Image: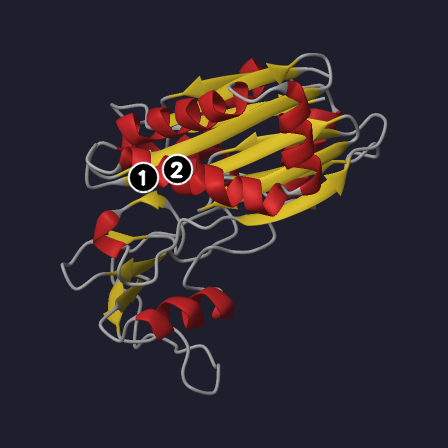
């Protein structure tokens, strides 16, 4: 079981991505990737990765295995809640978090926000391990946060509007796309933001920190999953600085083709410049094999 990671500042002046790898003897590998945003985002992401790994490393091996293997949803929710409390007061920003714990042939996943993980199969295909979309563009997430507050607004394609979906669940098309608005990713999706009554905007419905949104439905409770890793398969965990530039299958092909992390960063830099110019994002990539 091998875990390797890399960071690249992209076009940013501050590296707001962070990761940490923790090995529990020879039986388990813990990886957490965070992407900070807003005021103090770089401090918040660093706090989250260290806080969660410190909590796990304080457990005995027996307790660690029992909690991960038998009570993953409860454990991960507790870890994310503790990390959320730990970052309060650091800044007004927040962070995504994707936590992957591999124990033998099982990977336990928990995540908030738009950093995510994929499984790369033996044949070089991709399987999304973070299938729940923590964005207002998800009907489920939109309905959840809308039920928490009627005071929220949303920004889509550069336009501020009251709703993303109407009462019948149909997408509300904006009157127009604002001149100068840019796509969020290589797939051509427009960015969609939650806007709090304070005017603060957030591009996700779940995150750690972001206290301005905590009373308006933005949640720090993670989505969770468990998958089996077969022989010759691997997992890629990365921030949106990677996923905004590539579709999942292209990332899987690079990993399957034994492209090194340094080479991936160089390829990603070229793609980032082509898509976003100087606004290209920080990136963090970790691979478990």
Task: Tell me the SS state at disc 2.
Answer: helix
**Pointer 2: residues within 10 angstroms few (<14), some, or many (20+)?**
some
Task: Tell me the SS state at disc 1.
Answer: helix
**Pointer 1: residues within 10 angstroms few (<14), some, or many (20+)?**
few
Asked whether disc 2 touches disc 1, contact meaning CB atoms under 8 Å apart, the reply is yes
- Image coordinates of residue 185 in percent, x first then y, are 46, 47
Instruction: List the single residue furthest toward the left.
Output: 198
Disc assigned to residue 260: none
Seen in the image, is 14 located left or right of residue 108?
left
Residue drawn at x 66%, y 38% is 108
Disc assigned to residue 85: 1
- Image coordinates of residue 73 in percent, x first then y, are 59, 47
Instruction: List the single residue furthest toward the bottom.
Output: 168
Seen in the image, is 158 located left or right of residue 79?
left
The answer to which image quadrant residue 40 occupies is: top left
Figure check: 91 above or below 189: above
Figure check: 27 above or below 88: above
Q: Which residue is mark 2?
A: 82
Seen in the image, is 39 located left or right of residue 2?
left
| Residue 37 seen anywhere in this rendered image of the structure | yes
Q: Of residues 12 and 112, which is closer to you in this image?
A: 112
């Amino acid at each position: 079981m091998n875990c390797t990671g890399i960071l690249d500042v992209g076009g940013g002046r501050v590296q707001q991505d962070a990761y940490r790898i923790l090995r529990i003897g020879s039986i388990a590998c813990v990886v957490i990737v965070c992407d900070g945003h807003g005021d103090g985002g770089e401090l918040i992401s660093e706090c989250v990765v260290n806080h969660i790994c410190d909590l796990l490393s304080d457990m005995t091996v027996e307790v660690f295995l029992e909690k991960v293997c038998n009570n993953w949803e409860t454990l991960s929710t507790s870890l994310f809640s503790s990390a959320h409390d730990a970052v309060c007061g650091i800044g007004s920003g927040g962070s995504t978090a994707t936590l992957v714990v591999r124990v033998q042939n099982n990977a336990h996943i928990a995540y908030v926000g738009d950093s995510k993980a994929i499984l790369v199969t033996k044949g070089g295909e991709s399987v999304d391990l973070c299938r729940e979309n923590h964005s207002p563009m998800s009907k489920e997430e939109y309905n959840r946060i809308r039920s928490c507050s009627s005071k929220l607004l949303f920004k889509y394609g550069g336009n501020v509007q009251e709703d993303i979906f109407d009462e019948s669940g149909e997408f509300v098309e904006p009157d127009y796309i604002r001149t100068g608005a840019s796509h969020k990713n290589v797939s051509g999706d427009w960015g969609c933001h939650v806007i709090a009554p304070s005017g603060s905007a957030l591009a996700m419905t779940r995150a750690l920190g972001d206290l301005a949104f905590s009373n308006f439905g933005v949640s720090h409770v993670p989505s969770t999953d468990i998958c089996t890793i077969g022989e010759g398969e691997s997992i890629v965990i990365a921030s949106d600085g990677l996923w905004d530039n590539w579709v999942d299958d292209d990332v899987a092909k690079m990993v399957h083709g034994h492209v090194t992390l340094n080479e991936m960063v160089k390829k990603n830099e070229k793609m980032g410049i082509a898509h976003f110019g100087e606004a290209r994002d920080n990136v963090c990539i970790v691979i478990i094999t």
